[in-house]
């Protein structure tokens, strides 16, 4: 045996085969990285399977409820977290039409009334049901005072005439167009407010904690007492303020721009 094939230790010959041992030459950082990558890949595969199966299981149903006004002086609609579209309806009832999309699990949707309050309850687990949710259309009576409340979800209003409409949103944009209302009042926590009027209203009130406010009024003889303030944002208005005006405009945001104009 040559010197290259053995080594003397305490007078005993030790071969190269005897000093070879199982040893992971990868660094601890490399082993950790491989573990993380493996976990991420496994999670990605599972998520992809859930997404694909949920898409295959996706279904949409519709629900329509007619609620008579009766002797109510005002209707309050609590729409929860669903996206909401408000349109003009008949003079004697509130109609709620919902488009409900479910996936692996059924999307919850319930509607009920107590006194002057209509409550809509909806919800789904978006992480398990991609694309699930409820889109609700609310037909409100002509010339009737209506208060709409949402926790989260966008609100759109189209071609509503007469009466007083109040919208209160926790988080979500409010967009309104073609309005011929006597009064519009909108309050949001976080969200933009946009309103376009087809005729001159008596009053416009818009308040947002974080969001832009844009209001476009129709031309006409009515003048307005205008107040527009933003703590951190630009304010522009082409509507001259008249303290003795026939109507008033109040626009306030803590963080956002304000734009007021006439068509």
Image (cartoon, grey):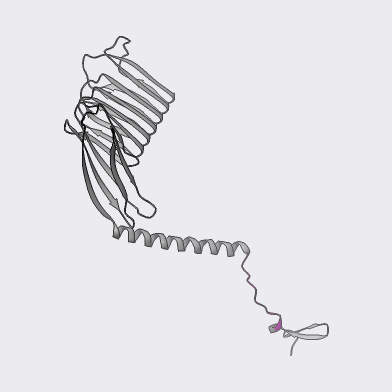
Which residue ends up furthest to the bottom in the rendered image?
A: 1
Q: Main secondary structure of the magenta part?
A: loop
Please state the horizontal and vertical placement of residue 181, each as a whole percent of the image: 23, 24
Work out whether residue 67 or residue 36 is closer to the camera in this orientation and state it.
67
Q: Which residues are magenta?
A: 18-27
Question: In the rendered image of this protein, does residue 183 appear above or below residue 29?
Answer: above
Please state the horizontal and vertical placement of residue 106, each as a whole percent of the image: 31, 54
Work out whether residue 64 or residue 199 is closer to the camera in this orientation and state it.
64
Asked if the magenta segment contains residue 130, the reply would be: no
Please state the horizontal and vertical placement of residue 249, each as a whole percent of the image: 32, 19
Asked if the magenta segment contains residue 22, the reply would be: yes
Point out the image quarter for the N terminus: bottom right
Question: In the rendered image of this protein, does residue 129 appear above or below residue 142?
Answer: below
Q: Quadrant of residue 146?
A: top left
Left/right placement of residue 74 relative to residue 40 reads left
Q: Quadrant of residue 16?
A: bottom right
The residue lying at 33 percent from left, 16 percent from top is 226
Please state the horizontal and vertical placement of residue 194, each as a whole percent of the image: 31, 30
């Amino acid at each position: 045996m040559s010197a290259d094939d053995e080594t003397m230790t305490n007078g005993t010959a030790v071969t190269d085969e005897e000093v070879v041992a199982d040893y992971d030459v990868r660094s601890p950082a490399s082993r950790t990285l491989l573990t993380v990558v493996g976990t991420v890949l496994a999670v990605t595969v599972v998520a992809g399977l859930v997404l694909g199966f949920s898409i295959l299981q996706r279904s949409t149903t519709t629900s329509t409820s007619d609620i008579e006004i009766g002797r109510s002086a005002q209707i309050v609609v609590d729409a929860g977290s669903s996206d909401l579209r408000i349109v003009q309806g008949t003079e004697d009832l509130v109609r709620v039409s919902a488009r409900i999309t479910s996936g692996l699990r059924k999307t919850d949707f319930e509607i009920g009334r107590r006194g002057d309050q209509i409550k809509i309850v909806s919800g789904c687990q978006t992480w398990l049901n991609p694309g699930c949710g409820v889109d609700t259309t609310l037909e409100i009576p002509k010339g009737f005072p209506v208060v709409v409340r949402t926790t989260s979800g966008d609100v759109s209003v189209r071609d509503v005439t007469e009466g007083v409409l109040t919208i209160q949103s926790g988080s979500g944009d409010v967009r309104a167009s073609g309005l011929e209302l006597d009064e519009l009042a909108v309050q949001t926590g976080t969200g933009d407010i946009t309103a376009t009027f087809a005729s001159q209203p008596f009053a416009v009130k818009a308040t947002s904690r974080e969001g832009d406010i844009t209001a476009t009024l129709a031309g006409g003889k009515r003048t307005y007492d205008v107040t527009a303030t933003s703590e951190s944002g630009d304010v522009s208005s082409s509507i001259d303020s008249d303290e003795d005006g026939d109507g008033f405009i109040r626009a306030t945001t803590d963080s956002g721009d304000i734009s007021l104009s006439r068509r």
